[in-house]
Each structure stands twice: as structure tokens, then as C-alpha cells.
Image (cartoon, rainbow, N blue to C red):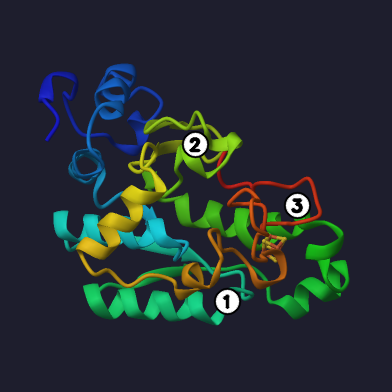
Amino acid sequence: MLPPATLTGSVTTTELETPQFDPEAVAADLEGASAEDALAWAIEQFHPRLYIAASFQKTSSVTVHMASRINPGVRFFYLDTDVLFPETYGTKDRLEERYGITFHRYSSMTLEQQAGLYGDQLWARDPDACCGIRKVDPMRSALSAVDCWVSGIRRQDSLTRAKAPKFAWDKRFSLWKLNPLADWSEKDVWRYIHEHDIPYNPLHDQGYPSIGCTHCTRRPAAGEDARAGRWAGTTKTECGLHG
Ligand code: SF4
């Protein structure tokens, strides 16, 4: 666990803007902490007002296993865009069964409603709008009643994530955000998954290093960046959840 020197109390909603800890000192402590210690600190500090996001990609397998071992009562959620891969839904089911947990589901309007309002295949014409409706709006709902969320992003994922801190104020959603795996390598992730025999998304074994919605994910070609298969053919690189 982290030394308590920089941690002087628990956070309440009204204290979020002026927390009773030194954010910079805590962020510096967490930057040098292991993923387990960072997660344990956040759970101790914020639970039950802590929400762990699951995309059912490989890093979700790590955070689910790690967090469940620290506190079996931790809370998880996912964003169901209604166009996730069958393998992704299957991974969700296997993790729930293995750890005896439930991933809280957040979603938006139906695909039919979206087509009625914005036309067919919005993802092909305006993926930012589609992600806004199917991901960002449900994310706001998910995070509206918690003080900290946990993501599985890593600095190695992409250039846009290369400077992601382990702990910081998330201006986009107005709460704290922990990225406990920020400094993990691809090897670190797979070593952990195999060491603990954790269920993971089988699409990773079929050439998908990064997995999102069916309409906007393809296998990267040899030599391409790991996230090249996301929104391929567009300039879009993020869904709007990670600022
Ligand atoms: S990833 Fe594609 S289908 Fe999924 S919400 Fe974004 S634009 Fe829509």
C-alpha cells in the first residue's frame, strides 16, 4: 500500500473540487506505485463511489482480476453500443462467471431509434456523432454518481495516450480517473493474464490487438499500429472517453 503521508481523509462528492488530500502528491505517489497498489489505494479511498470500466479487451481481464482480489465488492460497468462482437459479450459472461460479479450495463437509444433520427449507418458517415450517442452519453450516465473511475488504457496503446498519467482529474467527466496499467507493456498484460489463467477476449488470438464495435474494428495489416484497425480509413483515433 502507499504510505499514508499524502492521504488525509476520504473524499465526498462536495469535496471533489477541493479534496482532502494533496492531488499532486497523491498523483506522484501513484505514478511510482504498482498497478495493484494504485488500485488498492483507489478502492480504499473511493469505494463504493468507484467504478471500474470494462471494454472486455485484454486490459479489462487484468483489472477485473486484480480489483476482485483486492475487494470482491468492487463495482464494474460497461458501455453496450449494441454492436459489440459476439466474442466480446462472451468474454463478459465468462468474467462474470469466473469472478461472481455483474457488469452494470449502460446504453443509449436503440439502433432503430438512431437510424430514425440520424439516418442509417451513422458510424460510417459521422463516427464522432455515433460515438457521442452510443458511448459518451452512456458514459456520462455511468459516471454521474461516482467520484473516481478506473480505465485500462496504457501509454503504449497510441501516441494520444503516451502521456496518460496514472491518476488525475478527468475534466471531461468531472471526477478522478485512475489508469493503473498506464505503464504496462503488452508483455506485462499477457504475462499477468496467463499467470492467473484469466478469461480474455478470443479476438486477440485472431489478430485483433484493439477491439471496439463491429462496424469500426478490423484486423490491422502486418506492420500497422495496434490501433490502426479502429475507425480505419478515417482520422478518428479515440471514441471520446479518454481526454
Ligand atoms: S465505435 Fe463505431 S459503431 Fe461504435 S459507437 Fe463509435 S462510431 Fe458508433
- Check the picture and name the quadrant holding the C terminus: top right
**Distance Cα–Cα, label 3 vs label 2:** 21 Å
| Numbered marks: total | 3
Q: Position of residue 52 (x, y in %)?
A: 36, 54
- Residue 234 to residue 75: above or below: above
Which residue is the site of mark 2? 174
Q: Position of residue 199 (x, y in %)?
A: 32, 72
Question: As drawn, is 36 to the left or to the right of 208?
Answer: left
**Distance Cα–Cα, label 3 vs label 1:** 20 Å
User: Would you say residue 50 is visible in this rendering?
Assistant: no
- Check the picture and name the quadrant holding the N terminus: top left
Which residue is the site of mark 1? 85
**Distance Cα–Cα, label 2 vs label 1:** 30 Å
Residue type for callout 2: Ser
Which residue is rendered at x = 31% and y = 27% of the image?
Answer: 31
Which residue is rendered at x = 86% and y = 74% of the image?
Answer: 120
Which of the two discs, 3 and 2, sits closer to the camera?
3
Residue 31 numbered tag: none
Which residue is the site of mark 3? 128
